[in-house]
Image (cartoon, helix red, strand yellow):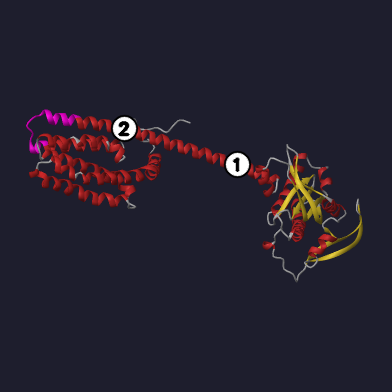
Amino acid sequence: MSAPATHRFTATFVDPALEAEFEREHFERATKRITRLTVTLSAAIFLSYGVHDAFIMPAALLHEAWAIRYGLAGPMFAVVLPLMWSRYYARWHRIALLFFAFTISAVVLSLGAITRGEPAALQTSWAPLFVVLGPFIARFDVAYQLAYAILTVLLYNALTLALGHESLVVPASINMAIVSMGLIGVLVARQMERQAREVFLQGRTIQAQMEALDAEKQKSDALLLNVLPAAIAERLKLENRPIADGFQDVSVLFADIVGFTRLSERLTPEALVGRLNQLFSAFDDLLDRFRLEKIKTIGDAYMVVGGLNGGKDHALALAELALDMLARIAELSAQFNEDFSVRIGINTGPVVGGVIGKKKFIYDVWGDTVNIASRMESTGSPGAVQVSHETYLRIQHLYVFEDRGEIEVKGKGRMRTWLIKERRGDVLVDRNSLVA
């Protein structure tokens, strides 16, 4: 991308909006701080040069010289210095600094004009020096530096014409000096303006790159958080080693969509995946209400764990989620005019969790608690939530249950299980305060 166009002479941006943005930023970043220092220091030095007048000015003109120096500079400083520390400085700083610089030139030119000989040459010689220092002390841009040089030349010639001069050589020489220093100041101002805008553009480029990097980081973090729990994602970014943890008290939920296999026999692959995505996305939306971790989907099965973050309400949160899932699947079944429901199983106990593999890795949990939760789902009934006895003990006072007695659980023998029928009407669950 090409750099923004600038005016050839002034080096300012052609785009007014971009130039205004640069002016605001450059004033706050550089001009305000630098000019406050340079102008205050210059004012102190200039006022102290009254001592210098006592050595070079004729005794008869000393009081007149001091009247000029302090009579012109004093009121100017009284206006400019307070303005520099006010909220109006950003708006009026260029005019204020031109007023400052021109008053200084007026003083030295006036002191030179009222004397003759060496004192006149010494006083007037300061004018070209002040002119060339305009870009450094007052941070003049090209236009204001040119204006400063022209005003200084005009003032010198007006004083010369008004008071007269024995020779034309001296005025011509001083004019050349002021003009030469003024032109050098203009070139310096132009180069400083160009460099300042280059720095400004580099800053914008760096900022844009940082924003792009931050956006990409946010995207990658979001993708990582879609795969891993937040705490595990942070550890994976910081630690270069396998991640495995033991959790002594968590709850695991498995949900399986009943009737989805029959649906797959008559839908195209695209339609089937789309329908499954709609169902599981609905579950994901419900999951956002609780501090629960979706672990994975396995075909048309959906696995969730609560308690990985150390909360104590994980069994209750999963029970609430399960009832919400039953209600949502009923709504979607009617919406799609399809005959399917969901079978849900929950178990509570210890698990081991960790990140598996180096490529296409996932966070998974293992242990008997997971296996039993899976069995609670597979041995349950469509449209029902079956929980183990361990989970029942945690939430028995909050729901109406159906005792299924002991059922045969593959690999575990006979186990007592329960079906959640509904929420108890005399108990209110504050879902917003659940810590799962």
Label count reads: 2
- The numbered mark, 1 or 2, whose residue comes first in the sequence reads 2
The reply to whether residue 140 is visible in this rendering is no
Three-letter residue code for mark 1: Lys
Confirm or deny contact between disc 1 and disc 2 (CB under 8 A).
no
Q: Residues within 10 Å of mark 2 (few under 14, many from 20)?
A: many
* Among the 4 quarters of the image, the one containing residue 196: top left
Instruction: Name the residue: 12% across, 41% down.
Output: 57
Towards the viewer: 109 or 295: 109
Q: Secondary structure at mark 1?
A: helix
- Magenta residues, as a range? 160-176
Residue 269 vertical placement versus 379 (above, below): above
- Within the magenta stretch, is there residue 35? no
Q: Can you tell which mark lies on residue 188? A: 2
Measured in 3D between alpha carbons, the distance from the residue under mark 1 to the one under mark 2, in whole angstroms, is 43 Å
Asked whether 168 falls inside the magenta stretch, the response is: yes
Coordinates of residue 383 in the picture (x, y in percent) = 82, 57
Task: Say which of marks 1 and 2 sits in front.
Answer: 2
- Residue position for label 1: 217
In the image, farthest residue toward the bottom: 426
At which x and y percent is residue 176?
Answer: 19, 29
Question: Position of 264 compared to 209: left or right?
Answer: right
The front one of 2 and 33 is 33
**Percent position (x, y) of residue 323?**
76, 59
Q: Secondary structure of the magenta portion, mostly?
A: helix
Amino acid type, label 2: Val
Q: Secondary structure at mark 2?
A: helix
The residue lying toward the viewer, choosing from 96 and 269, is: 96
Which quarter of the figure has residue 140?
A: top left
In the image: residue 410, left or right of residue 97: right
Q: Is residue 166 visible?
A: yes
